[in-house]
Amino acid sequence: MSLLTLNAGSSSLKFALFPDDGDDAPALLSGMIEGLGTRARLLVTHTNGTQRVDEPLAPAGDTDSHEARGRAPSAGARSMVNDTDEALALVLARLPEWTAGEAIRAIGHRVVHGGIRYTAPALIDDRVLADLNALTALAPLHQPFNLRAIAAAQRRFPGVPQVACFDTAFHRGHAFVHDAFALPRELHEAGVRRYGFHGLSYEFIAGQLRALDPAAHQGRVVVAHLGSGASLCALHEGRSLASSMGFSALDGLPMGTRPGQLDAGVLLWLMTERQMDAAALTDLLYRRSGLAGLSGMGGDMRTLQASTEPAAREAVDYFIARLREQIGAMAAALGGIDALVFTAGIGEHDPIIRARTIAGLGFLGLALDDEANAGHGRTHGGRISPPHATARVWVIPTSEEQVIARHLRAVLDRGDDGH
């Protein structure tokens, strides 16, 4: 029997299958559907690295598709996939094809927001689902898709245990000064506080760093999770001390379509002078801001760096400036820095962003080995700083799915609900 993990978002669906052997074993296979809403593509890779599937999925409106919208595609048919629901239907329908019919013992889900209550993974039941639905307003770009994945898996695998693993849980031990806003205390008690996100990624990186750099792991580490969503985490002795993200996934660093740090007065001005209501502000802040808003060209860093347009260059410059500032803020929270880790899509694959960021942080003892950085650290065990640097720099690929599988086994073994 196997363990299935699902990580559903608005533009992609990631999934993996793990052995149910009680060990922290690697995935049997992993895959994703990327480009939802544009030109979706299915990728599935076996654990030995041999790519098994690389399949373009018909874009919206493709008349060649033989599948009706919203129905589970049959194996081997050319599939139309426009959104998360259709991506889930395709993946769940074709799992037997990829797994030789191996049974699914349990399913683990990435859920972005767990609020105050969920500080550990939780076995999903009606009460948990009601709680998570109530948190949708705090993560409107993520929570609805996480919940759709749960519903789809329940329909496809009735009676199979399902576990929610929360991005916020890793940060729930923060001290009051890193948890609170300077608002009336009753709002803090009602749940208006700094939650932090990307916790599953940070938990994985903390575990990897323990093996790669034990001294740094026991010290002061800043992790930069840089992708379409981006944040920083200050780790001390492998635990989250502070995060650049706050009450929602809007705060901190500028992102693909989200603004990051923003003066709340801007929102008041938009409400009074532009008569923007909550729906309009939600659309602006989650879908039309960040790198996409600054550049007018979309939020893909690769596109922006390849462009000669001044607005694209300015968007990249802005991203790097804010990234340097907030790395400095995380170092201040830690009282210094022993290591900086880059991870996620931009962090793992963009040597230019890494080099430009480190170039402004020499005062923290950070430096780069240019050759190691160009090779993303692969020839140096992940380290991209020179031996003489007082603070080490690493590139460490993250795996939220590995952490979900680990928690899934633990919840099944314990039989507790994580409340």
Image (tube, rainbow, N blue to C red):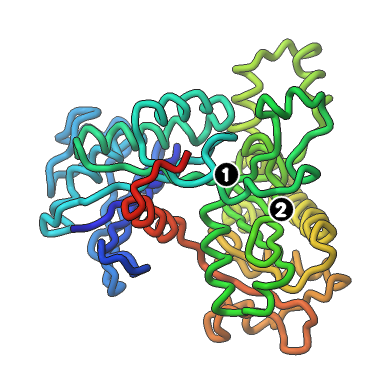
For the residues bearing labels 1 and 2, Cβ distance under 8 angstroms:
no
- The residue drawn where x is 57% and y is 44% is 168
Residue with the mark numbered 1: 168
152 or 3: nearer the viewer:
3
Tell me where residue 417 appears, x and y as whole percent. Answer: 40, 41
Q: Secondary structure at mark 2?
A: helix
- Quarter placement of the N terminus: bottom left
Q: Nearer the viewer, residue 257 or 252?
A: 252
Q: Is the residue marked by circle 2 packed among few (<14), some (14-19), or many (20+) residues within 10 Å?
A: some
Image quadrant in which you'd find residue 264: top right
Q: Is residue 364 visible?
A: yes
Q: Furthest residue to the right?
A: 363
Position of residue 212 relative to residue 256, above or below, is below
Residue 416 x %, y %: 38, 45
Residue 317's image quarter?
Answer: bottom right
In this view, 20 is above or below 133: below
Q: Earlier in the sequence, mark 1 or mark 2?
A: 1
Q: Position of residue 21 (x, y in %)?
A: 26, 66
Relative side of 403 to 184, left or right: left
Which residue type carries mark 1? Answer: Thr
Amino acid on which the number 2 mark rests in the picture: Val
Residue to which mark 2 is pinned: 316
The image shows residue 342, relative to residue 197, as above or below, that is below
**Foreground label between 1 and 2:** 1
SS assignment at label 1: loop
Residue 64 in view, yes or no: no
Q: Give the left or right position of residue 134, taking residue 151 as reference.
A: right
Side of 43 where 179 appears, left or right: right
Q: Is residue 193 left or right of residue 383?
A: right
Determine the CA span between mark 1 and mark 2: 28 Å
